Amino acid sequence: MRGAPPARRPMIDVPPAVTLRGVKKAFPLGNGRALDVLDIEHWALPAGRCTVLTGPSGSGKTTLLNLIAGVSLPTAGTIAVHDTNVSALPEPQRDRFRARHVGYVFQTFNLLSAFTALENVMLSMMFAGAIPKAEHRRRATEILARLGLAARLSHKPQQLSRGEQQRIAIARALANHPSLILADEPCASLDAGTARGVLDALLSICRGDGTTLLVVSHEPAMLTAGDQIVDITAINRLEDPARSVERV
Amino acid sequence: MTILTVALKYLRGRFVASALTSLSVALGVSLVIASVLLSRGIKQGFIEGTTDYSLLVGAKGTPTQLVLNVVFRMDVPTPNISYRIYRGLQDDPRIEVAVPVAMGDAYQGYRYVATTGEYFAAFPWRRKTFAISDGRFFRDDPAEQPSYEAVLGADVARRTGLRVGGRFHEGEEAAEYPLTVVGILRSTGSADDRAIFISLASYWEMNEVSRKMQVKPLTAVLVRSKRMSDLPSLHRGFNVTAEAQAVFPSAVLLSIFNILSLVSDVLAIMLVVVGLVVGLYLFVSMYSATLERKREIATMRALGARRTTILGIVLLESCALAVIGSALGIAGGHGLAYLGASVLAGRGGPVANRFAVDALELVVFIGAVALGALAGLLPAVLAYRTEVAENLAPLS
């Protein structure tokens, strides 16, 4: 692992990695009713920078990450990751685009329990199909070693500490050289010391590789280390999505 | 890594459940294989064990009982007929060969079959050949000078341990008339392997009732007519008398096969039910595994796995369970059939114990894998339709 992450970097003239235009997201509730969660007129995520997304619980942060990743589709509007309109892609292409260009780190790690640390990382490469098969083992080993897990390659998730599990999840997100990493409260279930180590690892690697990082976090360390902090309530035109009025 | 290795990893991940599911497939396949092999073996046993003679003359009763008793040494013995009938057949110009047979008691469960040397004779029309592996055939001794010589069927010699020169008798009553082994037959693949052959003179003298009879008794006469066209008149001639009946062994064999085919039909229905139960077990196993894994499936989808990839993984898992189960089942089925055939043969049942691997195994294997694919289809579709965002919601 590397040392402490470098200080916050300037945001002037940084091209956008992700651009949202007129994005709305509502969840159908049945009987023609829907719950509005997001309404973003315009938002651009600067490329190669670490953006920390904050906001109260239920304000649509995870929904926003899922929309950018193409895991779910907006009710209206467009989402462009670099030059690709993700929301307009058919599902198979969206899956492939996500596998190759987007790394996703979950709050609860979501490692696959039947597989070792090495295999969890290799699986990500298998799904993307962007890296030659012969390279999978070598690259996965290398990434895990960079995250201090060289001695844990053959361990299954349940044999590892929570901090180690999250570092494997980060390694998995980095496996396909993604240009964008989305992390949804990656340290929420870790103790302060472990959280600090995981964040340092994530930031070091992303900054070293010039990867765009969008992290949902309330960790003081993350708030300090991020290049910019965005409160979702500042970009979401819905006043209080958590208690938003159900519309008919 | 490939989707096959992913599927196999998942199977290993829930080893006990996978092993039990494979075992249930293996048991089902074993039952199918063993049942088919055994019913084939029994049918083949009847075909190979049947007589080359075209007509069997014996006491009145059911034709099936007569054939089962005289040819296959099964069922209860039929009453006796008079030796005169045999003499009459010998003098009949329509008859080429007539061989007398008298079924006696048993030694260690192996029936005494009293006959003449003609029983073992080779004729151009005979499919069955008798050969001696050790010793010689017994002598056709005159009625008043029994030799008490015995020729053992191959199984009798193997199971009783009797050798040429050995003397034996069953029970106190027969102690006065011990038999001497003079020869051991090579295996014929028929009920003759489980018989002890003696001369008619020896048999009549050993039996207290027949010893006193002026006209000696027989159980049946094996008949071969010179011309096929004479058979109907011979058959009719005996069946209009009150003393004896004549039966066509081939016709009786056909009626036995008809009964066997009925049993096979019932067995087939039961095997279909077994297949359905196994398929259902496989489905439940895969369905619960898929439900348990929805979060992992959603994670794989979030990592970029296509829906078809997820569908393929679940289908491959189900098929792999079926492949492992059916491979074990085929081996187990052969073992079970071998065991069943040995038990059946040990009890005197006609069964050909040659269970070579043929198209049956391939058909059962393909069928089991197709069943596996079918059982995995609904769970695979469930996995295919897994909503990512919905199943990735943080655990509370």
Image (cartoon, coloured by chain):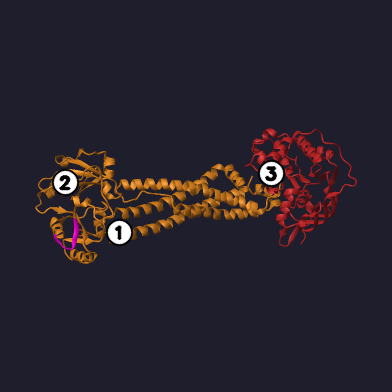
Task: Tell me the magenta residue range.
Answer: B91-98
- For disc 2, the chain is B
- Asked if the residue at tag 2 contacts the one at tag 1, i.e. Cβ–Cβ closer than 8 Å, the answer is no
In the picture of the structure, the residue carrying the numbered disc 3 is A110
Q: Amino acid at mark 1?
A: Leu
Foreground residue, A130 or A127? A130
- For disc 1, the chain is B
In the picture of the structure, the residue carrying the numbered disc 2 is B139
Report whether mark 2 lies on the same chain as mark 3: no
Cα–Cα gap, marks 1 and 2: 32 Å
Answer with left or right where residue A54 lies relative to residue B383: right
Chain identifier for the red-coloured part of the image: A
Cα–Cα gap, marks 3 and 1: 68 Å
Q: Which mark is residue B56?
A: none
- List x then y, in percent, for residue A31: 71, 62
Foreground residue, B347 or B389? B347
In the picture of the structure, the residue carrying the numbered disc 1 is B253
Q: Residues within 10 Å of mark 1 (few under 14, many from 20)?
A: some
Q: Is residue B99 above or below residue B167?
A: below
Between disc 1 and disc 2, whose residue precedes? 2
Q: Amino acid at mark 2?
A: Arg
Q: Report the mark closest to the observer, 3 or 1.
A: 1
Question: Residue at image x 74%, y 60%?
Answer: A33
- List x then y, in percent, for residue A67: 76, 52
Q: Is residue B235 above or below residue B122?
A: below
